[in-house]
Amino acid sequence: MSESQAFHRTLGLWYIGPGIGIKFFVVVEFTRQGDEMQKDIVIFPEPQELKIRKGEVAIALDMPVVISKSASELEKESAELLIKYIEDVSKKKLLLIKTDKIENKKRMILLRSLNNKKSSHKKGFSDEDGYFLKIGDEQVIIEGKNPAGVLYAVQTLIQLINFKNGILTVPEVEIKDFPDYKYRGLFIENKWGPDLMTLQDWKNLIDYMANIKLNALGIGVYGCWCVQYENKITEFLLLPFKKYPDLKTPWRIHYYSPLRKREVISDYLPEMFTRDFFDEVIAYGRKRNVIVFPYFNSAGHNTLIPRLYPDVSAKESTGVPTNYGFCLTNPKTYELLFNIYDEIIDRYLKPQGIDFFHLQLDEVYEVNGVDFKDLYRKVDPWCKCSQCSAKTKEELFIDFFIQLARHLKEKGMKKIILYADYISKIGLINESFSSRLKKENLFKEVVIDCWWYAPEISSKFPHFPSGVNNKLGLNLWVKPITCYWNWSWYGSYLNNIFNMLDKGYKEGAEGAQSYTVYDYGYHQNYYCLAEYSWNQRKKETLEQFREKYARFIFGAQWQKGKAALDELEKAVTTDEYACDHYARKLPYYFYTYVAGGHPYPRHYPQEVIESLSKEGKKYCEDIGQMIENITSAEKGFLSFKEKKTNFPRLIDCWLAECKRIKNINRELLIILEVENLRKVSSKSRQIIYKLKEALNMHNDMMAEIERVKSQYIVPGTLRNLMPMRDYLTCLLLRKNKKIAENLPGGLDKEAEV
Ligand SMILES: [Zn+2]
């Protein structure tokens, strides 16, 4: 569901008259704004200048939407978007008029672009994509600095529309607005879920982004990691290559579906790969001023290409391919990569005028879980052939990058982006690097993208070096996190987003594109990103953002809603290093990785139970605290469940997240308790009751996840909940099948298989 759809859910209810069979159709409207919000104007992202006047203007059928005869495609799209929104809310379809003769005093909504000719803003403002919006004197006047500005003014206007008692109104305001980051958006990682996104899912995502004025969508078209599921390396390729038809990443997801009451085995190739619709995603992006471009992982954690084309793989000193990383001195490596880049550029990017290309080049280090002969062996991505060995890693890396960048520039790419972490780690973000880029005539094109996902930015790590732009003059982007591990455990990343965008702005960054998987339930993180990438001048504190967000979502009862969000936040906020938070070690996902000292596949939940027993009271207390926070969050969200709210689906998502965290925690505590009861033989019946309680809890939570999450997220998420379900079922069956079957709910047939 797109955000605008979420604003006003329509419920269709059929009643069948007794004995007659007459059907009545009842429509219930949930309008965008409640009573409270008519007084408070809440706009996301926050406009740079907002003056509120006293009155309001009624929008009715006598008010046409007027655009110029020579209006651009984007202006036309913007006008249609507005008309469609008003029609969806009120069933009133405003007329679209194309004319250049404007009668000054007429009631109308006027949309026009200055086409960058002259600015209506204060001198010195970087007002590309900016707009001026004036509502008053029975008119709505929109003046975009360019067509994108018109679109953003329309997005603001949509947020201002009130619909009450069949009447549409907008408050009289004057807004001057423009973004502080030129590029704002999301990078969608390809695992586990985005690979199943349909073309419609991508379009919905683009609409969602445009609503909050995000304009850059990166898609991870190729990425590899290590063994996690099905004894296969986690690899994803979202584009088919004509020259390399062997390159593909089929997957099997085996999960239990509570709604279908059976196990499901899904064998598939990524949707975008099978239907080859990347160009259609790019084209749709253009309609919403969203630049869509590829991320192609070109160095670190790289397995699929080197395994299938061992010629280009990094080699052991014996010459044996490692199937991990590339030989950087072999001309065949370049030939293959360039062929792939060329296919991407010629088939998808060039025809649509896209000239952004992200090479990634991050995390070039040794890993385990990639050598099938010995999953525990750490494999080095650096090639040990004689030519590679003759050079330093620094020389190899820079030469590799320069050659890739040169090629991309020759192919017409104007933004050639690489991650900061590795190049910074080897000390190469310096004067000599920027001189080299100038000498190579690549200085203008290259962008350093700093990713960092923990709440505080630590100078102990190389990920976000200072001075990239304001000392060296290099183009800088920042990459906070807005959603990940959503297949496992909810996360709030507000501190990370706030700190990254704050530092980025001070450092002169032109882009902010978060690392993410698109999961609607992570709404608050996306809004936080939109807020601070658009507006850095207001110096809004994070607490102010949180309050504003609560007002936006919950309306008059925002304090109650914010209290629930606060409790959820307490339970999931990560500590210094995002992925080391102990809570992450409770759900199954953490145990999909190979780890020294543990058998593989790892034993779940036994490993957690062991460490909980070992760590003793402290962990159990922490878990108890988390359950307390979550229960109170859940209570808060539940109170909005039956109420008229602007975001019913979001409430459902948060409730499902609460249930997942709460139930996994409670199940673990029950298993611990059962471990103790087992020592007493007479407690058999009590044990069975406990286990059955845990299993019911687990099934109930899985069903909730399946009902609420987007369909492309469901399989991967339910798969992670299978091991606990299997474990509880096995224990029950081993204990006493007969007693277990006679308990309320019995045992699922499938569970016995
Ligand atoms: Zn080599």
Image: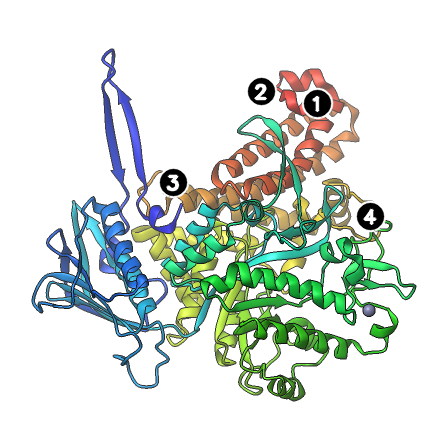
Amino acid under label 1? Val
Q: Residue at x 47, y 43 (%)?
A: 655
In front of the other: label 2 or label 4? Answer: 4
Task: Please rate how many residues cluster around mark 1, counting C-alpha atoms within 10 Å: few if below 14, some from 14 to 19, many from 20.
Answer: few
Looking at the image, what colour scheme do you see? Answer: rainbow
Residue pointed to by mark 4:
598
* Numbered circles on residues, count: 4
The CA span between labels 3 and 1 is 37 Å
Amino acid under label 3? Lys
Residue pointed to by mark 3:
641
Q: Secondary structure at mark 4?
A: loop
**Residue 617: x %, y % from top left:** 70, 48
Query: Is residue 749 positioned above or below 102 on the image?
Result: above
Task: Please rate how many residues cluster around mark 3, counting C-alpha atoms within 10 Å: few if below 14, some from 14 to 19, many from 20.
Answer: some
Residue 62 seen in the current view:
yes
Q: Indicate which disc, 1 or 4, sits on the residue closer to the N terminus.
A: 4
The CA span between labels 2 and 1 is 20 Å
* Cβ of mark 4 under 8 A from ligand 1: no
In front of the other: label 3 or label 1? Answer: 1
Q: Indicate which disc, 3 or 1, sits on the residue closer to the N terminus.
A: 3
Task: Please rate how many residues cluster around mark 4, counting C-alpha atoms within 10 Å: few if below 14, some from 14 to 19, many from 20.
Answer: few
Q: Indicate which disc, 2 or 3, sits on the residue closer to the N terminus.
A: 3
Q: Residue at x 64, y 27 (%)?
A: 692
The CA span between labels 2 and 3 is 28 Å
Query: If the image is split into quadrants, where does the C terminus sit?
Result: top right
Which circle marks residue 744 in the picture?
Answer: 2
Which circle marks residue 753 in the picture?
Answer: 1
**Residue 434: x %, y % from top left:** 62, 85
In front of the other: label 2 or label 1? Answer: 1
Query: Is residue 343 positioned above or below 669 on the image?
Result: below
Q: Indicate which disc, 2 or 1, sits on the residue closer to the N terminus.
A: 2
The CA span between labels 4 and 3 is 44 Å
